[in-house]
Image: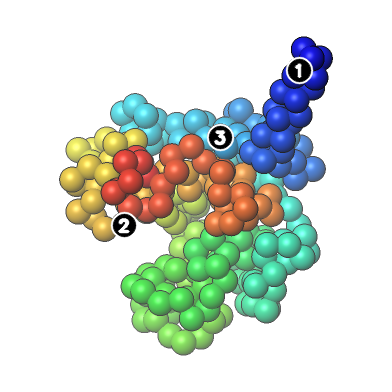
């Protein structure tokens, strides 16, 4: 009986592990602290969530350095064959922006999937596939052109990379509205764990998702569906509101 109970416990543990982790077969990034071959709720090939979020639980976000070309990710074909299938119809636009700005097309497709679920008709103040403000369009004016939209998102990303001295982590964070320590915001502390749902944080609109970097770098870029079956990726559990008790 004891052996049977032990077998049942082992089986349950294995089932839980399978439900809460995924192995993209990519390996772990040697330039990222806490990187693991498997994706878990708080780790993955591009580093641990604690590392990506350095400073958020203390005196403000101080993003560690990771160059764009050093980020691990699946191939574009793998992305289109999996969760990124809605993005495939826009491949020509991602390829054009990739050539123009020197950003791998799969990163652009992943951002479009994360931002709008690859819906070119997504509305709001930051419309379209890439969900960036009209300031990034030609002449600072939004247009109906899908290519202008993808170019605008790519331009914003590369501008942020350039302004951060080549740090892709800071650039991705900026894409989601994150800001660094000594930025002048949040009492000059930058983004902190308590900020998204503080009075000041909520006064600035939709709160930042503190799982964002982990979900993009270790979720979407690994071909995992962060909005669907793989929504266990991340430890803050933010639904981009402050009414559920989460820190966002």
> Closest to the observer: 232 or 16?
16
Residue 90, horizontal then vertical, whole percent: 64, 77
The residue lying at 69 percent from left, 69 percent from top is 85
Relative placement, left or right, of 166 versus 207 is: right
Locate the N terminus by quadrant: top right
Q: Quadrant of residue 236?
A: top left
Q: Residues within 10 Å of mark 1 (few under 14, many from 20)?
A: few
Q: CA distance from mark 3 to mark 2?
A: 23 Å
| Cα distance between the residues tagged 1 and 2 | 47 Å
Could you tell me which secondary element the residue under label 2 belongs to?
A: loop
Name the front one of labels 1 and 2: 1
The percent coordinates of residue 33 (x first, y second) are: 60, 28
Tag 3 secondary structure = loop
Q: Which residue is mark 2?
A: 206
The residue that mark 3 highlights is 42
**Reading the chain from its start, which is encountered first: label 3 or label 2?**
3
Above or below, 237 against 203 in this view is above
Cβ–Cβ under 8 Å for marks 1 and 2: no
Horizontal side of residue 142 vs 7, given as left or right: left
Mark 1 = which residue? Answer: 6
């Amino acid at each position: 009986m004891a052996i049977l109970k032990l077998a049942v416990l082992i089986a349950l543990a294995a089932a839980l592990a399978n439900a809460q982790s995924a192995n993209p077969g990519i390996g772990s990034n040697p330039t990222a602290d806490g990187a693991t071959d498997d994706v878990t709720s708080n780790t993955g090939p591009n580093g641990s969530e604690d590392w990506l979020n350095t400073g958020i639980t203390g005196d403000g976000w101080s993003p560690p350095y990771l160059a764009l070309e050093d980020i691990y990710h699946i191939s574009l074909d793998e992305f289109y064959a999996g969760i990124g299938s809605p993005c495939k119809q826009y491949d020509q636009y991602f390829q054009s922006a990739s050539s123009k700005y020197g950003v791998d097309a799969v990163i652009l497709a992943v951002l479009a999937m994360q931002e709008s679920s690859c819906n070119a008709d997504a509305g709001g103040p930051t419309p379209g596939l890439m969900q960036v403000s009209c300031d990034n369009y030609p002449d600072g004016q939004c247009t109906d052109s899908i290519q202008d939209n993808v170019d605008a998102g790519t331009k914003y990303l590369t501008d942020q990379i350039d302004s951060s001295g080549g740090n892709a982590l800071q650039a991705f964070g900026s894409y989601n509205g994150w800001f660094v320590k000594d930025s002048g915001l949040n009492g000059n502390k930058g983004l902190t764990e308590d900020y998204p749902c503080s009075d000041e944080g909520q006064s600035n609109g939709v709160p930042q998702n503190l799982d964002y970097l982990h979900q993009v770098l270790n979720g979407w870029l690994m071909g995992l569906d962060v909005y669907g079956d793989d929504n266990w990726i991340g430890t803050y559990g933010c639904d981009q509101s402050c009414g559920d008790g989460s820190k966002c």
